[in-house]
Image (cartoon, helix red, strand yellow):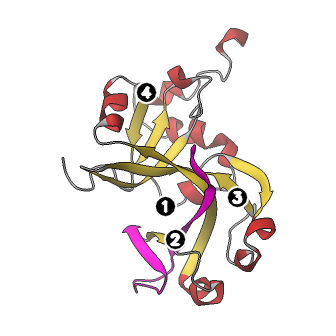
Amino acid sequence: MNGDALTGQLLVAAPTLRGSTFERAVVLMLSHDDDGALGVVVNKPTEVRVGDVLPGWVPVVSEPGVVFQGGPVSLDSALGLVTVAGDDEPLGIRRVKGRLGVVDLDTPAEIVEPAVSAMRVFAGYAGWAPEQLEGEIDEGSWYVVDSEATDAFTSDADDLWESVLRRQRGLLALVSRFPADPSLN
């Protein structure tokens, strides 16, 4: 397997994941290698304001200024995802792919702020053991698609599942019309 095969890609939950933690989830993959995979669900905002848990980061985070539920693993931990504004390697930021990076939330926010153009904070993450994710993809639980720079920072996170699928070609575009509750169809 390529050491970063899915890094930077999106996993879009298939409609068959209905009723699960990942129902209509869009996961941005932050790492994928022989040791497993890690990503964050980018379309599940919570009601918790960033200022309630990380007040120093309020001036840096993008609207809506809430913590997102990044996944079911380590919900008591926080992860900062950023878009790096320039080509430099800013202090406290580890690039994931292109301009996308993960910020060390122990770094003072005022050092990071000038280097980023967007930021989100996630509680928890999605993680898979070696070959677990590949099995889930093979069984049809996930669609793997290219990400766009704004996906993780969209102001319309609630409609991201539908909009990501709608921009795909062929049958995936049709899946975007799958009703949230098929029993109402």
Pointer 2 residue: 83
Dot 2 or dot 3, earlier in sequence: 3
Q: Secondary structure at mark 2?
A: strand
Dot 1 or dot 2, earlier in sequence: 2
Residue at 53% from the left image edge and 42% from the top image edge: 26
Q: Is residue 55 above or below residue 141?
A: below
Q: Secondary structure at mark 1?
A: loop
Apparent side of residue 155 relative to residue 152 in the rendered image (left or right): right
Residue 67 is tagged as: 3
User: Which amino acid is tagged 1?
Assistant: Ala
Q: Position of residue 179 (x, y in %)?
A: 64, 21
Q: Is residue 153 above or below residue 138?
A: below
> Magenta residues, as a range?
70-98
Q: Are marks 1 and 2 in contact (CB under 8 Å)?
A: yes
Residue at 58% from the left image edge and 79% from the top image edge: 106
Q: Are marks 2 and 4 in contact (CB under 8 Å)?
A: no
User: Where on the picture, by quarter, is residue 105?
Assistant: bottom right
Q: Secondary structure at mark 4?
A: loop
Residue situated in front as seen by the camera: 127 or 29: 127
Q: Nearer the viewer, mark 2 or mark 4?
A: 4
Residue 149 is tagged as: 1
Alpha carbon of mark 1 to alpha carbon of mark 3: how far?
19 Å
Q: Nearer the viewer, mark 1 or mark 3?
A: 3
Q: Mark 2: few, some, or many residues within 10 Å (few <14, many ≥20)?
A: many
Residue at 47% from the left image edge and 55% from the top image edge: 148
Alpha carbon of mark 2 to alpha carbon of mark 4: how far?
28 Å
Pointer 4 residue: 141
Residue situated in front as seen by the camera: 181 or 70: 70
